[in-house]
């Protein structure tokens, strides 16, 4: 990225982002505007991808809702994303978990979870 663009966007980057990875279960708190009212909506699922860098970084969260797979892409530094909570941590063997799209039922959310002592070692 060019230094001038990096300098301009530095003020817009969030500093309070938790250290989550692909495969982690997260809860994303989103600001939703309905008319003149604003409320917070929760979207919980598994992070299946992280892309980009800097102000353009985004992550994809997938969940199963009423038997149907639902995915949302969130810009990491968006003002509409209030906070991100890590629900459970896992240790995937891939950078993108797109293979979960072809699975059904419990298998669609089955990822090997990491032990607590092993995660802190990184």
Image (cartoon, rainbow, N blue to C red):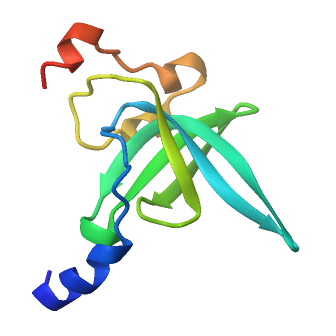
Viewport quadrant of the C terminus: top left
Q: Residue at x 21, y 28 (%)?
A: 93
- In this rendering, position of residue 53 left or right of residue 33: left
In the rendered view, tell whether residue 30 sits above or below residue 3: above
Q: Residue at x 29, y 14 (%)?
A: 114
Whether residue 2 is visible to the viewer of this picture, yes or no, is no
In terms of depth relative to the viewer, which is nearer, 111 or 59? 59
In the rendered view, tell whether residue 7 sits above or below residue 45: below
Whether residue 67 is visible to the viewer of this picture, yes or no, is yes
Residue 18 image point, x, y percent: 36, 41
Q: How many numbered tags mark residues here? A: 0
Taking the view exactly as shown, the residue that stands out farthest to the bottom is 4
Q: Residue at x 32, y 71 (%)?
A: 55
Residue 37 image point, x, y percent: 85, 66
Residue 20 image point, x, y percent: 33, 38
Q: Residue at x 71, y 31 (%)?
A: 67
Specify the quadrant of the image occupied by residue 81. Answer: bottom right
């Amino acid at each position: 990225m060019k230094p001038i663009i990096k300098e301009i966007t530095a003020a817009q980057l969030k500093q309070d982002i938790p250290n989550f990875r692909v495969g982690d279960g997260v809860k994303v708190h989103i600001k939703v505007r309905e008319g003149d009212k604003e409320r917070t909506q929760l979207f919980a699922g598994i992070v299946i991808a992280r892309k980009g860098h800097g102000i353009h970084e985004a992550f994809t969260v997938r969940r199963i809702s009423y038997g149907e797979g639902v995915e949302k892409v969130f810009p990491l530094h968006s003002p509409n994303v209030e906070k991100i909570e890590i629900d459970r941590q896992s240790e995937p063997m891939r950078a993108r978990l797109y293979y979960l799209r072809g699975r059904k039922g419990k298998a669609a959310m089955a990822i090997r979870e990491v032990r607590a002592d092993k995660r802190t070692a990184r």
